[in-house]
Image (cartoon, rainbow, N blue to C red):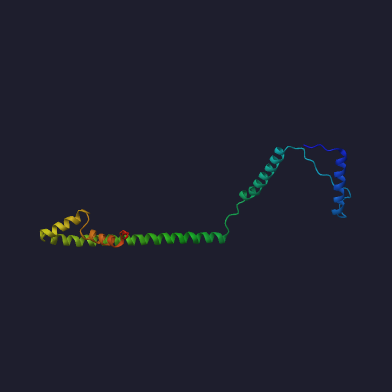
């Protein structure tokens, strides 16, 4: 902290008065208004600012939370339409799933019926045919023979093995 003499204080006041007279309007006083001196500590000043901001923030949201206007007719109709659309989409999805499940069950039943009609023929076939069917049935013992073959064909078409690159020098 630096101490200044009374003479220096008077010089500073005179300088500020001259600046005031240059920027003063006709409706303002002739003498420059004195600056308000706040003798509070920095902690007290900052705490007061924080409390003031917190009060303003709480007051801003206090009335918004207290008053509930409810929905007007347009909003209620719009929300009802949204709910109806969602219910309709869910119902369509459920019906499509049921149809797909039924189609799958029908296909499995058809394949099992076909495999049942093929089994008696394979039992009367030559022993070499029975060994080939036993090797494929070892993959899936409970599933009929035609199902693994079609599954294997589908998988074989979808899986692509990586080719090794040979460096020729």
Picture coordinates of residue 101 (x, y %)? Answer: 32, 59
In screen coordinates, is 153 left or right of 44? left
Q: Nearer the viewer, residue 65 or 13?
A: 13
Residue 32 visible from this viewpoint:
no
In screen coordinates, is 97 left or right of 36? left
| Residue located at (61% from left, 49% from top) | 65
- Up the image or down, 99 lies above or below 12; here it is below
Picture coordinates of residue 39 (x, y %)? Answer: 77, 38
Task: Looking at this view, name the residue that lies furthest to the front.
Answer: 169
| Residue located at (85% from left, 37% from top) | 5
Picture coordinates of residue 82 (x, y %)? Answer: 49, 60
Task: Looking at this view, name the residue that lies furthest to the right.
Answer: 30
- Count numbered badges in the picture: 0
In screen coordinates, is 80 left or right of 100? right
Residue 61 visible from this viewpoint:
yes
Q: Nearer the viewer, residue 103 or 67?
A: 103
| Residue located at (18% from left, 60% from top) | 116
| Residue located at (58% from left, 59% from top) | 72
Q: Nearer the viewer, residue 94 or 114?
A: 114
Q: Nearer the viewer, residue 57 or 24?
A: 24
Quadrant where the C terminus sits is bottom left
Picture coordinates of residue 1 (x, y %)? Answer: 77, 37
């Amino acid at each position: 902290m630096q101490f200044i003499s009374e003479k220096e204080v008077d010089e500073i006041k005179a300088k500020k008065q001259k600046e005031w007279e240059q920027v003063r309007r006709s409706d303002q006083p002739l003498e420059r208004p004195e600056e308000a001196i706040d003798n509070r500590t920095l902690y007290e000043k900052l705490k007061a600012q924080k409390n003031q901001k917190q009060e303003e923030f709480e007051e801003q949201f206090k009335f918004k939370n207290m008053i509930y206007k409810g929905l007007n007719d347009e909003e209620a109709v719009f929300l009802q339409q949204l709910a109806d659309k969602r219910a309709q989409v869910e119902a369509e999805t459920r019906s499509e799933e049921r149809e797909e499940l039924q189609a799958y069950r029908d296909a499995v039943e058809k394949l099992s019926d076909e495999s049942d009609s093929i089994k008696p023929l394979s039992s009367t076939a030559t022993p070499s045919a029975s060994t080939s069917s036993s090797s494929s049935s070892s993959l899936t013992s409970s599933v009929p023979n035609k199902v693994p073959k079609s599954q294997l064909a589908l998988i074989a078409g979808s899986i692509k093995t990586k080719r090794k690159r040979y460096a020729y020098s």
